[in-house]
Image (cartoon, rainbow, N blue to C red):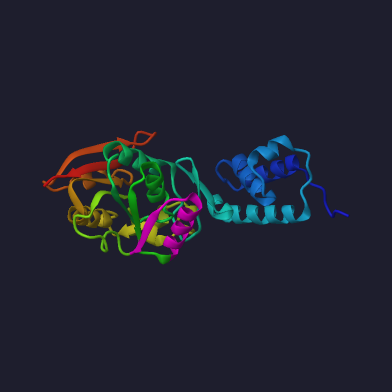
Amino acid sequence: MKLLEVTVRTALQQATKILDEEHVAAARLTAEVLLAHAMKRERPFLYAHPEQDLTEIEWIHYGRYLNERTDGKPTQYITGRQEFYGREFRVTPDVLIPRPETEHVVETALEVASQARRIVDAGCGSGAIAITLALETGAHVCGTDISPAALLVASENALRLRAGVEWLVCDLLSAVRDGSVDLVVSNPPYVPSGDQAYLQREVRDYEPAVALYAGPTGFELYERIIQDAERVLGPGGWLVLELGYNSSHRVSGMLGARWQEPRITPDLAGIPRVLATRLMP
């Protein structure tokens, strides 16, 4: 005998109200994603079966997920999933959640360096960029990260998506050989360490600090990557960097005389999002 009877429709209505009251963005969508996760179904199932009763275990899991979300835990860390460039990636609190704007890094890399055969993603996190480029180009791709836990997540994603990527535990490009690369891509940490209090709690309290904070100015890792990219890239190689908000002029100003053909790509909001530049002899 059931202790309660709650339909999919009722569960979604109640959850949406709770999330709205807690000022959670996209409350209805979040309610659907979490319920589908609790029921081990995809979202279309909810639309097709609004009168289906939840089992007790589904209701218990759903309540826990809602509580975690209202406490600030990102939905992606609750479900363990995030889509990137049309593929599903596993994410945990050991890696930054891939953002849609980071897809512009992939698009730019494919545009400027489609013939690159040796690619390095510096600070690869979940492996979203590295794996996507490996699958889209067939090139030899290496992902580096200072966090062994992040690389474990990345390697699991590569195995599941059948992408051949080499993983290196190292600080950015420190373990990459001189002149061995055609393309360096990176979405580095770029939040100034003093800005922690201004971040959304979902970011500040849950995403890994090592993937967020660059140092006092926020530009420290850009300087290191640009300098080291001159060492690891062969002549004519490309560097593609994701840019933080309002950082394009400062990062562009770090480029020395050997960097040519700089171009800035905006995201869908018109914000300068990606810097691409080519290394000349």
Q: Which residue is rendered at x = 43% and y = 51% of the image?
A: 163
Q: Going 41% across and 56% down the picture, which residue do you hit?
A: 125
- When asked about the image quadrant of residue 12, the answer is top right
Please tell me in which quadrant of the rendered image residue 61 appears.
bottom right
Mark yes or no: residue 238 visible.
Answer: yes
**Depth check: 270 or 128 in front?**
128
Q: Position of residue 150 (x, y in %)?
A: 43, 61
Residue 201 makes an appearance in the image? no
In the image, the segment drawn in magenta is 149-169
Placement of 117 over or under 125, stated as above or below: above
Is 209 colored magenta in this rendering? no
Q: Which quadrant of the structure image shows residue 126?
A: bottom left
Query: How far across and down, in percent of the image, does residue 225 sit?
Result: 24, 55
The foreground one among 69 and 109 is 109
Is 250 placed above or below 77 here? Answer: above
Q: Position of residue 198 (x, y in %)?
A: 41, 53
User: Which SS type dominates the magenta stretch?
Assistant: helix
In the rendered structure, the answer to whether residue 20 lies left or right of residue 5 reads left
Q: How many marks?
A: 0
Left or right of residue 162, residue 115 in this image: left
Which quadrant does the N terminus fall into?
bottom right
- In this image, 168 relative to 74: left or right? left
Q: Nearer the viewer, residue 238 or 81?
A: 238
Q: Residue furthest right?
A: 1
Residue visible at 13% across and 48% down?
A: 256
Q: Position of residue 66 (x, y in %)?
A: 64, 52
